[in-house]
């Protein structure tokens, strides 16, 4: 867990056991499964990481949240290394609103065979107000699957880029990309 900038926290987990990512890519230094928390008037979490690291990820979340409850879970990509813990997360934080696009919600039902109880369906360019900042969702179909979307925090000038700009490896896959201008 670490503070990145402007009340954005990294809560991802590093996998040191993995030898082949997706059974084919050599990752001698392991793999990073990235997830972030934005602590504002409202709290948003981005992505839910690989299934085997549920406990470590939920502990990281709790360390950041302390006594607060998350308002939104933003699902940017449905590949399981981003999304496997959505239902496990909702068991712990059942009042959280899941934010994603229609294509991703369709996939969520196919993956988990359950409806998401509280959901907010967004379209390309839609915004979400967290109080001190506004997030903008930008669809990026086929980077890497058709449902992928990215999230831009204009206040912090941070782009949460899902699989975009990433590479395989530790602390490098699915990077958080920060624009400065
Ligand atoms: Fe992916």
Image (spheres, helix red, strand yellow):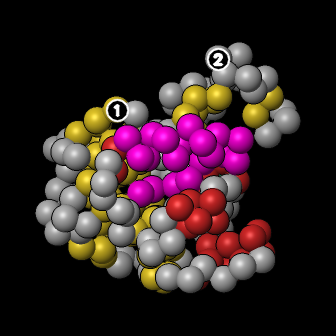
Residue 86 seen in render = no
Residue at image position (56%, 53%) is: 48
Q: Badge 2: few (under 14), some or many (20 or more) residues near its Cα, within 10 Å?
A: some
Which residue is depicted at the point 60% across and 42% down? 55
Q: Give the CA distance from mark 1 to mark 2.
A: 20 Å
**Horizontal and vertical percent for residue 159?**
35, 51
Where's residue 7, x and y in %? 22, 46
- Alpha-carbon neighbours of circle 1 within 10 Å: few (<14), some, or many (≥20)? few
Q: Position of residue 169 (x, y in %)?
A: 61, 27
Numbered circle sitting on residue 2? 1
Residue at the far top in the pictured view: 28
Q: Is residue 126 visible?
A: yes
Which residue corresponds to the image point at 31% horizontal and 54% vertical from the top-left? 67
Classify 65 as above or below 126. Answer: above
Using residue 150 as the reference point, say whether residue 69 is left or right of it. left
Residue segment shown in magenta: 45-63
Label 2: which residue?
29
| Quadrant of the drawing holding the N terminus | top left
Is the residue 61 above or below the residue 102 in the image?
Answer: above
Q: Earlier in the sequence, mark 1 or mark 2?
A: 1
Q: Is residue 94 magenta?
A: no
């Amino acid at each position: 867990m670490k503070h990145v900038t402007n009340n954005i926290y990294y809560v991802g987990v590093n996998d040191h056991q993995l030898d082949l990512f997706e059974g084919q890519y050599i990752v001698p230094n392991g793999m990073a499964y990235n997830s972030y928390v934005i602590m504002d008037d409202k709290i948003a979490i981005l992505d839910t990481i690989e299934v085997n690291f549920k406990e470590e990820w939920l502990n990281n979340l709790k360390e950041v949240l302390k006594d607060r409850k998350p308002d939104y879970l933003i699902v940017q990509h449905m590949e399981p290394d981003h999304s496997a813990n959505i239902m496990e997360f909702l068991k712990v934080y059942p009042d959280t609103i899941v934010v994603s696009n229609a294509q991703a919600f369709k996939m969520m039902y196919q993956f988990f065979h359950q409806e998401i109880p509280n959901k907010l369906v967004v379209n390309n360019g839609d915004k979400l107000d967290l109080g001190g900042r506004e997030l903008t969702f930008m669809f990026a179909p086929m980077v890497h699957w058709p449902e992928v979307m990215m999230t831009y925090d204009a206040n912090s000038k941070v782009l949460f880029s899902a699989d975009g700009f990433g590479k395989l490896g530790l602390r490098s896959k699915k990077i958080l990309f920060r624009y400065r201008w």
